[in-house]
Each structure stands twice: as C-alpha cells, then as structure tokens.
Image: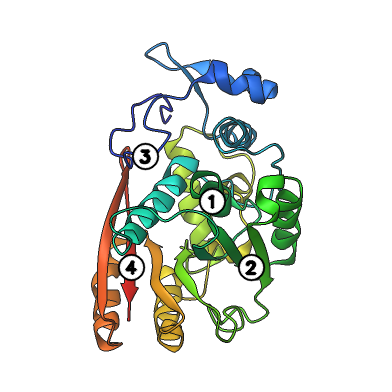
Amino acid sequence: MKDSNQTKKKLHPRNKHNKSYDFEKLIQFVPELISYIKKNPSGKDTIDFAIPEAVVLLNKAILMSEYKITFWQMPKTNLCPPIPGRADYIHYIADLLAETNDNQIPTGKRVKILDLGIGANTIYPIIGVAEYGWEFVGSEVDDESIKSAKNIIENNAFLNQNVSIRKQDNKRNVLKNIIKEKEYFDVVICNPPFFKSKEEAISKTSRKLKNLGKEIKVKPIQNFSGQNNELWYEGGEKAFITNYIYESKHFKTQVIWFTTLVSNKEHLKPLQYLLKKSDAKEYRIINMEQGNKTSRILAWKF
C-alpha cells in the first residue's frame, strides 16, 4: 500500500503537498474521513488508497482545507484526481509564464488558460484560481461531466467569475470549435486519455489494484473510476497528442504556450519530431516527480 505520509521532496517548491498529510486538520473539514484513517507500518496515519470512497473524501478535505473550496462532489463514475500532481502542473505553468514577465508570475484574470477536458472534478481551474487568480475556459465532451463541473463552479463563489465551460461536440477535435475567432489564451493545458481501449484500461487497472493489495471482487474498471473519454482514446495518449499538435498549428497566433502531460516517456521522441516538422519555434520537456512516479509536461509554441 502506498504511504501517504512519505515526504514528497521532489514536488514543485511552491506545492502545498511537500509535507505529510495533516489528518487532524483534514478531518476538521470532512469528518467522515476519520473512519478510513489507519496506521501504516511506521505508525503514521494514512488511508487505503485502493478504497475509492477514502480517496474521494481525502481529496475533498484537501480541496476544502487548501484551495478555498466549500462544495465538491462528482459522480462515482468519474476520475478522482491525485491533487499533489495536478498542483505541480499548475505551478510549472506559472513558472513558464514568468519567463516572459520579468521572472514574475502573472496573476489575476489577465491570464487566460484553456483546460482541455475539464472533467467532472474541475481540478485544474480550482487550483489555478485559488493559487493565482487566473481565468479558465474548460472544454469537455461528456454531458455528465459538464453537469458536474458546472455544479462545482456554481457552488463556489470564487470560481463563478473565473471559470466557464464549453462543450466539444466532435470527439475527434481538440482545439477546433473551442477556441473562438480572435480569442487569445496564454496557455493551453491538457491531461490526455492514456489508454488505447477499454480492454487495456481494465487490464492495467487490475494490475494496479493487485499491486495495492486489493482483492478484485468487482469489475476493476469500477474501482479505477472514469468515463470513457477520461480513460481511453482510439490510439491512446500518443494519438491524442499527435492530433493536438496538428491542430495547434491552426491556432498559433492565438496561444502563447501549448502544453500537455505525457505519461509514457517513449512517446516523447516521436512527438518532438512531429513538433520539429510542424515548425514549432520552441519546445521543451518539463519533468515532474511525485514520490516514485515520474511524469512530464511537453510544452511548445510557434
């Protein structure tokens, strides 16, 4: 079982989650969390990360204690994000913006971010607005996810004036039909679907649950949670990002930085080659490490 109390020394320096979770503080915001707290082999408080209900309550408590949230709930069928890693993405984007702003992080509504696939949890706008006051537009293909995201936005006053949602009617499109004519964004962020198919998602989720020590008694995809569009895309992560790069050329005068998470490091070389062929003016890889997990941001501009 994963130890939530391990010091996350490799997170971004501004990340609020570099220290162990303060469960005494967290249960003050979400009292129901107390029934899922247990001791790890070192005698420190933790939860069983293989129990979806425990993870949801932990995340809810984190958002309420650290990110101004007063209301946060979503369908059980949607992804419950690991907040420390999501916060890292936002902080590295802030660093990217500071490079062209006299090394000062730009804050407030003058910074406009497009979140591709805002999801039911609305996690990136929550962190970005709470930490930096940025304005967000979130795109989404799934009606239930849109309903959930709007519910979160409408029930948190600090999000109302800073976050809006647009429906992507064509699942084959990434930026098309979302970025309007003469509209301008400082950064596009994206956490792309990882799996190539439902079968691959189920297989790898079963392995993940086994590693967590969870006996599989139900269909494993239910434990992992996530709607189809969140988990898999025909061709997987590489195909999605490839499509994204091709589309980005058409909006090169309307966006400063295009970015995406890349989970599989083997995808980096072909994606960099594609960016070179696409005449990207600059592209770079920003490494992010959370405990034993390594991810990376691929960023490019024209």
| Kind of residue indicated by mark 3 | Arg
Check disc 1 and report the residue beneath it: 133
In primary-sequence order, the first of circles 3 and 2 is 3
Q: CA distance from mark 4 to mark 1?
A: 22 Å
Residue 217: percent from the left, percent from the top?
62, 39
Check disc 3 and report the residue beneath it: 14
Say above or below: 1 vs 120.
above
Residue 301: percent from the left, percent from the top?
33, 76
- Select label 2 or label 1 by which is in front: 1
Q: Which one is in front, 110 or 85?
A: 110
Asked if residue 244 lies left or right of residue 115, the reply is left
Which quadrant, please, contains the N terminus? top left
- Where disc 1 sits, the SS reads loop
Residue 86: percent from the left, percent from the top?
46, 48
- Where disc 3 sits, the SS reads loop
Check disc 2 and report the residue beneath it: 140
Q: Which one is in front, 297 or 40?
A: 297
The reply to whether discs 3 and 2 touch (Cβ–Cβ < 8 Å) is no
Asked if residue 53 lies left or right of residue 155, the reply is left
